[in-house]
Image (spheres, rainbow, N blue to C red):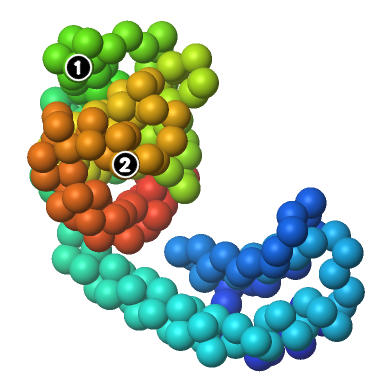
């Protein structure tokens, strides 16, 4: 079945059928063009195929759109060879390495070392800004951690531990501040109710615009992460 589906959707990187304890089926297409078909455990193969067939137009449209975005990203990033955006500013690898406290600068970039430097820079900035906004908002959090999350920029646990994705190092500082305010607001509201958004916008009036800008920038982030991989 999977081979036949792959032939039907040649743009898809891979197709996965997942049976889960859910009531309704759904299709998720990720930025790398992977297609996930998630269905209730009771679904038969025929039901799965019927469900996919019903949504084939949407699948093709979405895959084509993502493929075009991927190509656009590739062309755009080619104009920034040997560079990475740090807080929204494109910098040469060598400049980042030289500016660090490292003992020497290698002739060629060392991804692990470069990523460690960027992680430290991000943690320092987020720690500073979390303290500032938490004081401004009258809130208290437990701790802060930088994660490798790819599907979200931040999260706030039930016991108010703040988590931020390493991908934020690529974003403008005003967009990072928006994410910080967003997660701090979850200390008060563990949901995305109107009350939650009212609190976010009270301390970040341009929240909607920043959210949109972050989503637009994020299409380049997977490729940028690859630059920091061996």
The spot of residue 17 in percent (x, y) is 75, 67
Is disc 1 placed on a helix, strand or loop? helix
Q: Is residue 39 above or below residue 201?
A: below
Which image quadrant for residue 202?
top left
Please state if 92 lies on the left or on the right of 17 as rendered.
left
- Quarter containing the N terminus: bottom right
Q: Is residue 18 visible?
A: no
Which residue position holds label 1?
Answer: 137
Which residue position holds label 2?
Answer: 194
The spot of residue 73 in percent (x, y) is 29, 68
> Which residue lies at the image location 46% right of the left edge and 46% below the top edge?
150
In front here: 37 or 100?
Answer: 37
Please state if 34 lies on the left or on the right of 139 as rendered.
right
> Which residue lies at the image location 88% right of the left edge and 64% below the top edge?
42
Which image quadrant for residue 196?
top left
> Which residue lies at the image location 89% right of the left edge and 74% below the top edge?
44
Is disc 2 placed on a helix, strand or loop? helix
> Which residue lies at the image location 19% right of the left edge and 17% below the top edge?
137
Q: Is residue 195 visible?
A: yes
In front here: 17 or 52?
Answer: 52
Residue at the extreme front of the image, as rendered: 195
Q: Earlier in the sequence, mark 2 or mark 1?
A: 1
């Amino acid at each position: 079945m999977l081979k036949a589906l792959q032939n039907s959707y040649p743009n898809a990187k891979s197709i996965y059928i997942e049976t889960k304890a859910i009531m309704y089926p759904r299709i998720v297409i990720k930025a790398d063009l992977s297609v996930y078909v998630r269905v209730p455990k009771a679904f038969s193969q025929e039901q799965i195929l019927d469900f996919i067939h019903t949504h084939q137009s949407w699948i093709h449209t979405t895959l084509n759109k993502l493929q075009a975005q991927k190509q656009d990203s590739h062309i755009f990033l080619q104009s920034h060879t040997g560079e990475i955006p740090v807080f929204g500013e494109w910098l040469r690898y060598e400049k980042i390495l030289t500016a660090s406290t490292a003992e020497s600068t290698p002739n060629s970039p060392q991804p692990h070392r470069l990523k460690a430097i960027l992680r430290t820079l991000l943690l320092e900035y987020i720690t500073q800004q979390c303290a500032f906004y938490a004081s401004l908002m009258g809130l208290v959090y437990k701790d802060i951690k930088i994660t490798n999350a790819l599907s979200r920029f931040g999260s706030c646990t039930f016991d108010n531990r703040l988590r931020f994705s390493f991908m934020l190092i690529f974003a403008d500082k005003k967009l990072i501040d928006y994410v910080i305010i967003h997660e701090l607001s979850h200390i008060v509201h563990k949901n995305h109710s109107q009350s939650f958004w009212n609190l976010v916008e009270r301390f970040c009036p341009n929240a909607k615009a920043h959210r949109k800008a972050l989503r637009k920038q994020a299409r380049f982030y997977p490729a940028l992460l690859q630059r920091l991989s061996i």
